[in-house]
Amino acid sequence: MPIDASTVDSEESRVEVYVTTDTSAAPHKADEPRLYVMYDAANPDGERLYFTEAEWDAFVLGVKDGEFDLDESGNLP
């Protein structure tokens, strides 16, 4: 289900990312030298997304390429 961007309060939901060498929280990626960890700063105890360096690089390229841009209604095209 698409998220209506107009209902997202930037004060309530803020994505943060940090880099760690501790892979214990993501055992399926334990062989990686470092992980990029993304989470909602408004809910720091919530779920986290773990990216390898290659996955993070691909994500950043997708952002720069507009892959995640929303249309006028706040939905992915």
Image (tube, helix red, strand yellow):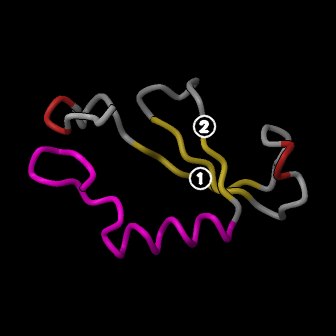
Dot 2 alpha-carbon crowd within 10 angstroms: few under 14, some 14 to 19, many 20 or more: some
Tell me which corner region of the image, top left, top right, bottom left or bottom right, holds residue 53: bottom right
Does residue 31 appear left or right of residue 74 in this picture?
A: right
What is the number of the mark on residue 18?
A: 1
Amino acid type at image mark 1: Tyr
In percent of the image, x 59 and y 53: which residue is there?
18
Identify residue for label 2.
Answer: 48
Does residue 50 appear left or right of residue 70 in this picture?
A: right
Name above or below for residue 43 compared with residue 5: above
In percent of the image, x 80 and y 56: which residue is there?
21
Earlier in the chain: of badge 2 and badge 1, it is 1
Name above or below for residue 47 compared with residue 28: above
* Residue 50 position within the rendered picture, expressed as x and y whole percent measured from the top left: 66, 48
Furthest toward the left, the residue is 72
Q: Nearer the viewer, residue 67 or 30?
A: 67
In percent of the image, x 27 and y 35: which residue is there?
3
* Residue 20 position within the rendered picture, expressed as x and y whole percent measured from the top left: 72, 54
* Residue 41 position within the rendered picture, expressed as x and y whole percent measured from the top left: 45, 35
Mark 2 element type:
strand
Does residue 9 appear left or right of residue 68 in this picture?
A: left
Task: Kindly report the distance in space between the C-alpha atoms of the residues bearing marks 2 and 1.
Answer: 11 Å
Looking at the rendering, the stretch of residues picked out in magenta corresponds to: 53-77
Mark 1 element type:
strand
